[in-house]
Amino acid sequence: MAESAVKLDENAHRALLGLKASVPDDAMTAELLGTEREGHAVRIRADGLALTVGYLVTEADAVWLTNSDGESAPANVIALDHQSGLALVRPDLRIGEAHLAPRRIEDMEPGASVRILNSVGGFALSASLAAVGEFAGRWEYVVDRALYTIPACDDWGGAALLDTDGALLGIGSLLLELPTQGGSSVYGNMFVPTELIMPHVDDLCLYGIRRTPPIPWLGWMVQEHEDGFAVVGIYPDGPAERAGVQLGDAVIEVAGRQFDTLGTLFRTVQSVGSAGAHVPVTVKRESTAIEVDIVSVDRNAFFQKQPAGPVN
């Protein structure tokens, strides 16, 4: 992974915080994501409010933030916004005020120079925007305009993606392989645009959730394969399990519609209505087509009341 360091102003590197989170051994995400998680958070307000990637603090029972001077403080998860995949955290004690201003990405095009801030040492990594496009994750997650950067960097979770003026564009989420024009692939990173959560920050701070109708959640994980879309995970006592969906089922139709991408599958589910809507799904099990009626739920409510236990 070729990396080139760029010196940043003091405000930028002081806005980046180290994050550590502990998760109970019996949490649903413990086996998949681990019980001790580390990454970063980026302060976006002088009162200490910071953004991070959601998976770092999902089901966490303890969170600590550390500033560039080595000062640490316990922190609260203010909101876990499943729709954007981002989370808001705030330390219990003041450990600095430096913060970054988020900006929209409408004028960001492939080839643009960007900076990745993933170290409290005052330097950022020089990178370029490889693509701006859809990302769909098997955990019922879809982003219309994710930010893909090259070259790949280590320690990407919660890292800050900046434009050349130091404005905050996105939060680091994944390391993945990106296709090239020559038909090969190269490792890069995916960043979640901050604009997905910023319009909802005030409501998230007040209520812990968005003040918009929650999107339907089916409690399954679906993976795209060469020959279709397979159910590769099911949450215990979730909507899909209660409807009789089984691991290995091939998803053929949702609400009478077929799809050619994972993102289209998830958007079709969301188009049926808000959380609570009945979602008709056709699955193929061995050689038999089976119709199931999945009663969707609000993902936030499910995780708040769900007893611990691993995902199947």
Image (spheres, grey):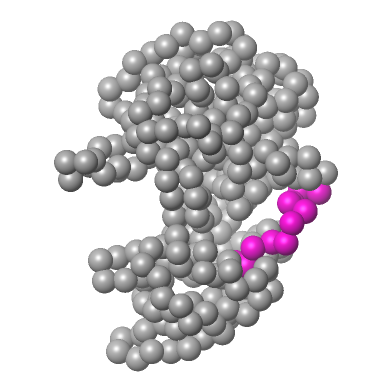
Asked where in the image residue 261 lies, by quadrant, the reply is bottom left
The verdict on residue 213 being magenta is yes
Q: Is residue 203 visible?
A: yes
Q: Which residue is drawn at 45% across and 21% down?
A: 115
Q: Is residue 153 left or right of residue 266?
A: left
Q: Residue at x 59, y 48 (%)?
A: 84
Residue at the extreme front of the image, as rendered: 107
Q: In this view, does 89 lie to the left or right of 192?
A: right
Please state, as top left, top right, bottom left or bottom right, where the N terminus lies in the image: top left
| Majority secondary structure in the magenta region | loop
Q: Position of residue 206 (x, y in %)?
A: 83, 44
Please name whichever residue, 38 or 48, is drawn nearer the observer in this view of the structure: 48
Please name whichever residue, 267 or 6, is drawn nearer the observer in this view of the structure: 267
Q: Is residue 205 visible?
A: no
Q: Which residue is drawn at 69% across and 61% down?
A: 214
Bounds of the magenta segment: 207-217
Compared to residue 71, the image places residue 128 above or below, namely below
